[in-house]
Amino acid sequence: MIEKRSDYRYRYTTKVNYGSINNTGKGFAQDISLGGMFVNGMHNFPIGADILVTVPFPNSNRYASLEGTVARTTAKGFAVSFKRQRRIIHSNNDWSSQVWNKL
């Protein structure tokens, strides 16, 4: 199998919140890179759906909200391809202003 990713993947697992206009949930992010991540969790997102993933910083009450698009889905979760990021870092989890005011 040929690797299509251009960014190095970090084998790091952490709890995340995620959501779109119609759907929110919690899961575990894994295989994180600058270009995206895989989220292990229940979902009902179609491929191409806009999504927001909130990732906590280790040993901190701060977290980053990352905007992306669902790139693929599996029975275990979904892959997110990150959009170009605005620097969004929060210090208390208000669930990212209710999923960035519904994207």
Image (spheres, grey):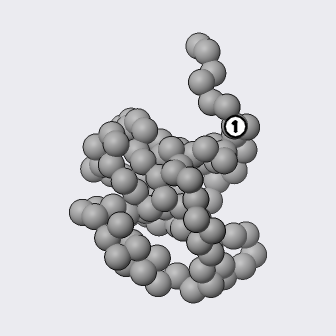
Does residue 16 appear in this view?
no
Q: Residue at x 67, y 31 (%)?
A: 6
> In what element is the residue under mark 1?
loop
Return the x and y of residue 60 as percentages of the image width and height: 72, 79
Q: In this view, does 68 lie above or below 23?
A: above
Return the x and y of residue 49 as percentages of the image width and height: 33, 49
Residue 36 as seen in the image, left or right of residue 18: right
Front in this rendered view, residue 24 or 98: 98
Residue 8 as seen in the image, left or right of residue 71: right
Return the x and y of residue 1 as percentages of the image width and height: 59, 13
Q: In this view, does 34 lie above or below 15?
A: above
Residue 18 as seen in the image, left or right of residue 6: left
Q: Residues within 10 Å of mark 1 (few under 14, many from 20)?
A: few
Q: Total marks drawn?
A: 1
Q: Residue at x 40, y 57 (%)?
A: 51
Return the x and y of residue 98 as percentages of the image width and height: 37, 78
Q: In this view, does 29 lie above or below 101?
A: above
Q: Residue at x 62, y 84 (%)?
A: 91
Q: Residue at x 33, y 40 (%)?
A: 47
Does residue 74 appear in this view?
yes
Residue under label 1, please give it.
7
Extreme-top residue of the structure: 1
In the picture, the quarter occupied by the C terminus is bottom left
Looking at the picture, which amino acid does disc 1 mark?
Asp
